[in-house]
């Protein structure tokens, strides 16, 4: 069986106008994958969503809406493990407090919960220059 | 954001003409709704027929509209949810908060009863 390796490395300005571009990359990966027997439409939506949520978090909470900063995103497919890393270069945020579902009438704070629901592993680590949100899905 | 706003008497219809409702444009939707509330409107229908992707910030804007409408003794109802968008409401349990209709005419009719 052929197992494809994919590595996507992209840097975009710290601006929400690029959410669509990044989300679409996730969606297209889901539609292009070889050897995926699950619901592709669902996977496409899910990857669009986790990339959109992770990048929006980096923009709004970690890089604090500074348009001169950058968001760095890595997407790796290694042996049916899809690894998404979103790097920010800001002050970071406390991921732990957002892992549980919000009250339905809360307006904010659902992004990390959604990521945690969709992905198999989620971690937020400090790097030398900022932080990285790593999300893994076993396909 | 591309949004069609039409006063239908019993309620105001806001038809979102965007493929995505996300952190880039949800603030716009929120502002349009706030303006309507300030004008004294309290019953809204947000039609999402054209929307195929909603993120947490899009959901947040709708929750904000719902709370504002409720505090004015009105309501914010939704219509035209695509399958994947509907799943987002289920995943976040928001399907229990909003009245969701198949299309905007049904949602508007519900305000006239």
Image (spheres, coloured by chain):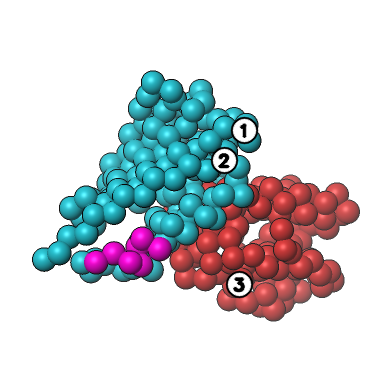
Chain colours: A cyan, B red
On screen, residue B88 versus residue A1, left or right, reads right
Residue carrying label 3: B49
Judged by its main secondary structure, the magenta piece is helix
- Which circle's residue, 2 or 1, is located before the other in the chain? 2
A30, B25: nearer the viewer: A30
Chain at tag 1: A
Residue B101 visible? The answer is no
Rounded to the nearest angstrom, the CA distance separating label 2 from label 1 is 7 Å
Q: Position of residue A77 (x, y in %)?
A: 26, 52
Chain at tag 3: B
Residue carrying label 2: A13
Residue at the location (15% across, 64% down)? A2
Which residue is most to the left?
Answer: A1
Rounded to the nearest angstrom, the CA distance separating label 3 from label 2 is 31 Å
Q: Are labels 3 and 2 assigned to the same chain?
A: no
Residue at the location (60% across, 57% down)? B21
Element type at mark 1? loop
Q: Position of residue B2 (x, y in %)?
A: 72, 63
Q: Are labels 3 and 1 assigned to the same chain?
A: no
| Quarter residue A94 falls in | top left
Chain at tag 2: A
Q: Nearer the viewer, mark 3 or mark 2?
A: 2
- Which range is magenta? A28-34
On screen, residue B101 versus residue B14, left or right, reads left
Q: Is residue B30 magenta?
A: no
Quadrant containing the C terminus of chain B is bottom right
**Alpha-carbon neighbours of circle 2 within 10 Å: few (<14), some, or many (≥20)?**
some
Q: Position of residue A33 (x, y in %)?
A: 29, 64
Residue carrying label 1: A68
């Amino acid at each position: 069986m052929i197992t494809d390796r994919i590595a996507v490395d992209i840097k975009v300005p710290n601006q929400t106008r690029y959410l669509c571009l990044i989300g679409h990359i996730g969606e297209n990966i889901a539609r292009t994958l070889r050897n995926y027997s699950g619901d592709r439409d669902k996977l496409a939506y899910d990857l669009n969503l986790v990339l959109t949520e992770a990048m929006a978090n980096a923009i709004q909470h970690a890089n604090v809406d500074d348009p001169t900063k950058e968001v760095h995103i890595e997407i790796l497919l290694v042996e049916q493990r899809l690894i998404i890393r979103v790097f920010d270069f800001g002050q970071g945020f406390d991921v732990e407090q957002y892992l549980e579902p919000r009250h339905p009438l809360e307006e904010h704070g659902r992004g990390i919960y959604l990521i945690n629901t969709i992905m198999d592993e989620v971690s937020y680590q400090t790097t030398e220059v900022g932080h990285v949100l790593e999300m893994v899905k076993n396909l | 954001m591309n949004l069609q706003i039409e006063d239908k008497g019993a309620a105001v219809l806001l038809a979102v003409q965007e493929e995505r409702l996300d952190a880039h444009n949800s603030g716009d939707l929120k502002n349009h709704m706030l303006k309507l509330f300030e004008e004294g409107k309290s019953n809204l229908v947000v039609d999402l027929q054209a929307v195929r992707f909603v993120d947490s910030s899009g959901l947040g804007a709708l929750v904000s509209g719902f709370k504002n409408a409720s505090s004015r003794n009105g309501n914010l109802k939704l219509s035209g949810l695509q399958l994947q968008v509907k799943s987002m409401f289920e995943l976040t349990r928001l399907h229990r908060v909003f009245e969701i209709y198949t299309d905007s005419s049904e949602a508007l009719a519900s305000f006239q009863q």
